[in-house]
Amino acid sequence: MKTIKASEFKAKCLQLMNEVADSGDSIVITKNGQPVAQLCPVISRPATLAGCHKGTMGIVGDIVAPLGESWDAECLSS
């Protein structure tokens, strides 16, 4: 975890906020050598599990084309 003096944080606040958002790492802000605050990224959670992976997965290739494998299947009739 990175530490930074309060005076330096004041001068570079917006840059450090972007850095934390991009890297996901927290920064401890010190005053007179003592930690007084911590800047950490916000972790958002979906409201429900339904659709939480939307946009993170994709289909590669043709999923309905025959594989070219031969196999035996039995038909069970009642």
Image (cartoon, helix red, strand yellow):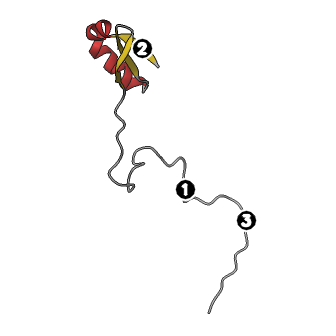
Crowd class of label 1 (few under 14; some 14 to 19; many from 20; radius 10 Å): few
From the viewer's side, name the closer residue of 46 and 77: 46
What is the distance, in whole Å, between disc 1 and disc 3 at their CAs? 17 Å
Q: Which residue is mark 3?
A: 70
Q: Which mark is residue 63?
A: 1
Residue displayed at 47% across by 47% down: 58
Q: In the picture provided, is 34 more to the left or to the right than 68?
A: left
Locate residue 11: give its quadrant.
top left
Q: Secondary structure at mark 1?
A: loop
Name the quarter where the C terminus is drawn: bottom right
Residue displayed at 38% across by 53% down: 51
User: Is the residue 35 above or below the residue 55 in the image?
Assistant: above
Crowd class of label 2 (few under 14; some 14 to 19; many from 20; radius 10 Å): some
Q: Position of residue 76 (x, y in %)?
A: 65, 86
For the residues labelled 2 and 3, say whether their Cβ atoms are less than 8 Å apart: no
Residue displayed at 37% across by 19% down: 19
| Mark before the other along the chain sequence, 2 or 1 | 2
**Tag in front: 2 or 3:** 2
User: Is the residue 69 above or below the residue 56 in the image?
Assistant: below
Amino acid type at circle 1 is: Ile
